[in-house]
Image (cartoon, rainbow, N blue to C red):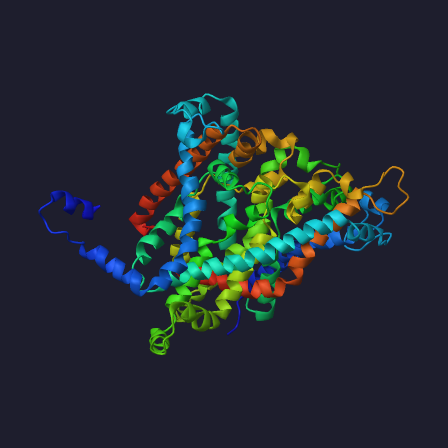
Amino acid sequence: MKKSFGEITFEVFNYTILILLATTMILPLLQLLAVSFSSPIAADSKQVFLWPVGFTLDTWNHILQNGVLWRSFGVTVYVTVVGTLLSMLFTVLTAFPLSRRDFMLRKPIMFAIVITMIFNAPMIPFFLTVRELGLMNSLWALIIPALISTFNMIIVRTFFMGVPSGLDDAAKIDGCNDFRLLFQIYLPLSKPVLATISLFYAVGYWNIFQTAVLFIRDPKLYPLQLRLREYFQAPEELAAVDLIMNELAFNTTTLKAATIIFATVPIVLVYPYLQKYFVKGAVLGSLKD
Amino acid sequence: MSQVNTEMKGHTKLVVPKKEKSLLRNMKKNWMLYVMIVPGVLYYIILKYIPLMGTVIAFQDYQIFNGILASPWVGLQNFIFLFSYQDFYNVLRNTILIAFYQLIFGFPAPIILALLFNEIRIKFLKKSVQSLFYLPHFLSWVIVGGIVFELLSSQGVVNAVREWLGLETILFMQKESYFRSIVVLSSIWKNVGWGTIIYLAAITSINPNLYEAAVIDGANRWKQVKHITLPLMFPTILVLFLLNIGNFLELGFDQIYNLLTPMTYSVGDIIETYVYRAGVLQGQYSLTTAIGLFQSLVGFTLLYIFNRLARKTEQGLW
């Protein structure tokens, strides 16, 4: 079929605008990457666009030797790993009974859970409750409140409900109890959905910010996001040397750029996986509606 | 309860009601399921329901040493104080304005983008463009805030381009007049790509025969969008709109907190950032809980109103 003139104009326009907009999603990062490899003079005199000017590794040398930054990185890795594992356990253990027809409290509990999606507690009562639990300045404050995401739990539950019931009967005849049924039959069958959900949790823990602002006051326990925030507020701390006397080839502009890239790299590295599974998960979630 | 009742009547036989009996039997038979649900139930009670009940301190003069049980009740005094307090109006105005702009500009953006994506006929191009658009969703607001500050700083690339064009340098992040636009634009930048996924799923589920029939009837692409795609996307749009309006005043602490500077408080301080400062940092627990409750009530009222309106045309959330 031949395309009309109007259609061709539209296509050219559509492709151009979408490609242009798509590049704006990555250009800021590329620009900061270029700044992080540039000399401070070039960076401060607005010469750097997408290619380093006055190439230097000094900024990165300084950043990668920053023990405080690595410490926060470690805290975030710890919270992400422990948090994701526990979240998966809690989510699966909650979703399974709620997916079983022979569990009599299924409906009332499900109802009570959905209620919490509509009526969310305000910030202060939440803050006071977690503080009462004694979690102030504890990394558990980052994990425990995020243990179950109702959205994720419902996705898993929906998936469990779709498993053919013939499997259960066969397993029950073989004398399989509910725990074994869940861990040896249902979980292996749900690998794709579990992969998706664990990524949802992992990204959530990696980027956790508000709960850290509320509960983590001890700088030694700062997760990465909180440390970044502190550095953006007071970039002199990043330098940790007297910049006026400084003979080194970096300054706060290049350091901030490098810190942003430093924090972005892990996400970008796992991005292909993230994208693949996340899109699936988001569609799963939307079908639920 | 009913057991006690039957006992009090004295003469009647002690009958365990049928439902409880079968629940007990169910528990005995499927006790493992009941064990499994315990951690989840504890989670929802401790981290959702207890804070929810803790909202009653909005009607108290909550003192940390007395706790909820011993703190004096003050009725609506906190609310009365709020509405006679100039700062609150300022914060409320900022919140409503930003929320309104987000709704007007931020809500339709992914719908339009999804329609444009759908018109890409080259598969490879569609995939790569989508991948790029999804990326910012995975960055935290701390990072996005950092990027925004760097790009808009006096040495940033935006001012570099301005200089190149012969324009003077502007300190965007310190100017009140730019703050709300920056909030709306950065939030579109971060969320627009991700937001398309749900709409694209809705578009994919449309029966292709409809388009074929439309082509035979001589409908061009625009007419196909207008008469097929959009009407069939409408239920999805409506559901998302209702979910959005339900937390109209909840703008997200992370974004504003990371973009705000003392220079822009007058236009950018919103309920969440104010509650954090006055509540968490300064300990005005009851007052800020009252603000939080007010915020939820506004969201719920809006949801109720729009859901009623929605039910007149389509179906609502309930």
In front of the other: A281 or A172: A172
Direction from residue B316 to residue B147 in the image, left or right: right
Q: Residue at x 30, y 49 (%)?
A: B311
Quarter of the rendering occupied by the N terminus of chain B: top left
Direction from residue B252 to residue A161 in the image, left or right: left
Q: Position of residue A197 (x, y in %)?
A: 51, 61
Q: Position of residue B216 (x, y in %)?
A: 40, 71
The answer to whether residue B183 is seen in the rendering is: no
In front of the other: B213 or A86: A86
Up-down relation of residue B108 to residue B94 (above or below)? below
Q: Can you tell which quarter of the image residue A238 is in?
A: top right
Up-down relation of residue B272 to residue B210 (above or below)? above
Question: In the displayed image of the protein, which residue is found farthest to the front?
Answer: B10
Q: Can you tell which quarter of the image residue A199 is in?
A: bottom right
Total marks shown come to: 0
Q: Residue at x 47, y 53 (%)?
A: A149
Up-down relation of residue B137 to residue B278 (above or below)? below
Q: Can you tell which quarter of the image residue B37 is in?
A: bottom left
Direction from residue B79 to residue A130 in the image, left or right: right
The answer to whether residue A79 is seen in the rendering is: yes
Q: Position of residue A223 (x, y in %)?
A: 64, 48
Direction from residue A224 to residue A192 in the image, left or right: left
Q: Position of residue A72 (x, y in %)?
A: 68, 49
In front of the other: A128 or B180: A128
Q: Residue at x 34, y 52 (%)?
A: A111
